[in-house]
Image (spheres, grey):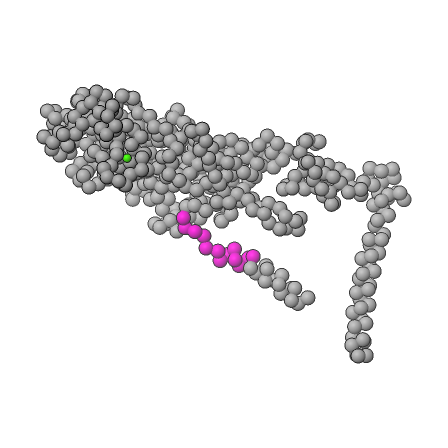
Amino acid sequence: MRFQFALTLQAIWTGMCHAAMQHYPAAWGHYDVCKSQVYSDEGLTWDYMACQPEAADMTQFLKVSLDPPNITCGDPPETYCALENPYMCNNECDANTEELAHPPQLMFDIEGRNPTTFWQSTTWKKYPKALLVNITLSWNKTIELTDDIVITFESGRPEQMVLEKSLDYGRTWQPYQFYATDCLDAFTMEPKTVQDLSQHTLLDIICTEDYSRGYVWKYDKTVRFEIKDRFALFAGPRLHNMASLYGQLDTTKNLRDFFTITDLRIRLLRPATGATVVDESSLSRYFYAISDIKVQGRCKCNLHANSCVFDKEKLSCECEHNTTGPDCGRCKRSYQGRAWSAGSYLPIPKGTANICVPNNIGPVTRVCDNELLRCQNGGECVSNRCSCPASHTGLLCEKPRCESELGGCKGPESGQASLRPPSLCSVLTLLLAGVALWRETPRRAAAL
Ligand SMILES: [Ca+2]
């Protein structure tokens, strides 16, 4: 008895203390299981948890479009010069020759081998008319950014550029960040950096001069949109306190939406010139060229799915918790017993699944299941209907059968009534027998 009690205490201690001592991974990537089977008083049941797909390279799943559509170089073929040397004009772009073509998909191929592959625009032949290019990346699915967006230029970095996002499949656009060599001049905005932001101003849209300075372009080719620095405002510099970030994401819709997109748009407004004055005698030096774009993120599944599939050119969540839709944004038809709700990151680490529950309407086809609506009093769920024992009836075998019989449960013919005295008796008998045994034991021991 003492041993059992000690075991129970140990189990309680382990349960409570282990939860308190558990260390959570710092990475932006747990919540990877949606449900697990557990043993409870009612036997094997499901335990549901908030879950999300792993972060991935999202450039594999996008569609790219350019505006104007004929802005890619090479049709007709043209020669272009090096920005730093107007006499070095031995490069050619020809859309009809594979080795000399620079189509948009070269912004998303695997880099690492020399020479780099890149998309390139036509040159700035129509100066002083602005050389404007919109590059739109569309996922046709809501995704959540998990790492910095990094655009690597093969040419000099643009002197003016805006990164924009859409949350409604490209119908409306909001700026993410402005980039310029001179923010005041280009956008009448004070130059800032992400380090100027605080928890309270995290959603402010800034103009930065960090990624546009002309003369160092040869060694510094990237333009960033800093997602991790923004996360760090809540999670600490090394993102060690993700619980704090998750908590904020959970309670602040604006913050969650800030990192959520369906489309990105890079608006190139003015190419690198490397000088204050444009050399009109050599406009073939000015163009845009991008070798790589990195976008890390995950499908937004409202914490109801841990995987996302790319099928027929389209991403969609593999919804759990009785939810459905591309983002698991609604309850399945027969699981509308309460209003749909997104899962929650809280409490850490399992979160709250907020699963959809079965419809609660009279004699429907689905009366029971092995998860939430279990048959009672020993009934078994067969084809979503309860097969009740002889003593009980009702949709979930919740009513004693005698209640519906003549005379009710108090009548002499009632099974329930006739069952009661023996079961009470047997309990009493057992108790008495126990007491007798307890009294007898010391005497026997003494006799021996
Ligand atoms: Ca490339």
Q: Nearer the viewer, residue 202 or 368?
A: 368
Whole-percent x, y for residue 164 in the image: 33, 31
Whole-percent x, y for residue 249 in the image: 44, 41
Verify whether residue 316 appears in magenta. Answer: no
Q: Nearer the viewer, residue 40 or 252?
A: 40
- Look at 13% across and 29% down and name the residue there: 89
- Look at 26% across and 37% down and name the residue there: 152
Q: Name the quadrant containing residue 407.
A: top right
- Look at 37% across and 31% down and name the residue there: 62
Rendered-image quarter of ligand 1: top left
Looking at the figure, which quarter contains the C terminus?
Answer: bottom right
Q: Which residues are magenta?
A: 15-27
- Residue 255 vertical position relative to residue 14 in the rendered view, above or below: above
Q: Nearer the viewer, residue 203 or 50?
A: 50
Residue farthest right in this picture:
412
Q: Is residue 322 left or right of residue 156?
A: right
- Look at 83% across and 41% down and name the residue there: 402
